[in-house]
Amino acid sequence: MSTRNAAQAKDFPHVPSYAACDTPKAIARPDFIQEMAANDASAVPQRHEIYHLVHKGLRAAMSDALVRLGRVDNANSENVALVCSAVEDLLGLCREHLEHENAFLHTAMEKAVPGSSRCCADDHAHHVKSIADLGERLREARAATPLARERALKVLYRLLATFVAENFAHMEIEESSNTALLQKHYGDAELLAIEHQIHAHIKPERMMIWLRWILPHVSRQQRAVMMRGMQAGMPAELFGGVLEMVKPYLTDAERVALAVDLA
């Protein structure tokens, strides 16, 4: 080793050999898959699940924004702008979704069982702060010089990944525990009425954005039920707009299947 390299080596702290810490056996690890299977097995079949479809759309939007941010071309300003817009759009959807759940679903839960929404309401308060923090990081990334941009986008990516992970775990609580409570205290007609109240609260241009994420990312059967309902209840011109909007996000096989289902 040269004198220069030896001097440089002294600048680095000594790193001891890595050894994994022993985890006390007494610590219980939650088995989310087993718990979900147990909830699923005990669920009453054919009940309306008010969270299910919108959460499919949200999971798709979150995954899409995260993947796009991870593969962003830092040297391409146009690509960076498009990816940042996708993240901004996602944060807007998440903010709206929290407002809908707080105003309608948590209200229904509290009416049935006072205090039952507290856990998820606390999560929502944390998510509101996270959305604001992500928005600030997003503004920093957009304003960063080309030299600082890569670091800013990397930080944004890691924070968004954590936010997505927290939301995925949170949505499972809503789809299991919250759904069970709502189904116990409300009939399907009442749950559908709550869902219709949420839909009426969403402006038409925002509803189109929600449908852009929900319709392509549900099962064929779910898509057919949703779109047949819209076909029956919408003016033909408006339904045609929804149909043309969703087609580019479907595979060739899915487009053929949808045509059959709507015939």
Image: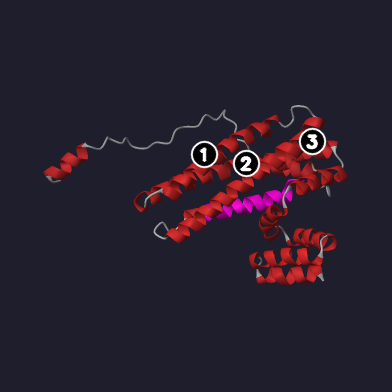
Residue drawn at x 76%, y 58% is: 222
Query: In x, y percent, where is residue 207?
Result: 71, 54
Residue 125 image-quadrant placement? top right
Q: Amino acid at mark 1?
A: Asp
- The chosen color scheme is secondary structure
Mark toward the start of the polypeptide (3 vs 2): 3
Q: Is residue 3 left or right of residue 109?
A: left
Q: Amino acid at mark 3?
A: Ala
| Residue indicated by mark 2 | 169
Q: CA distance from mark 3 to mark 2?
A: 22 Å
Q: Which label lies toward us, 1 or 2?
A: 1
Q: CA distance from mark 3 to mark 1?
A: 30 Å
| Residue indicated by mark 1 | 133
Q: Which residues are drawn in magenta?
A: 50-68
| Residue indicated by mark 3 | 108
Q: Is residue 44 above or below residue 61?
A: above
Which residue occupies the foreground of this view, 219 or 32?
219
Query: In x, y percent, where is residue 65?
Result: 55, 53
Q: Is residue 237 left or right of residue 28?
A: right
Are circles 3 and 1 on residues that touch, CB within 8 Å? no
Looking at the rendered structure, the secondary structure element under dot 1 is: helix
Neighbour tally class for label 1: few under 14, some 14-19, many 20 plus, Cα within 10 Å: some
Are circles 1 and 2 on residues that touch, CB within 8 Å? no
Q: Amino acid at mark 2?
A: Ala
Residue drawn at x 58%, y 53% is: 63
214 in magenta: no
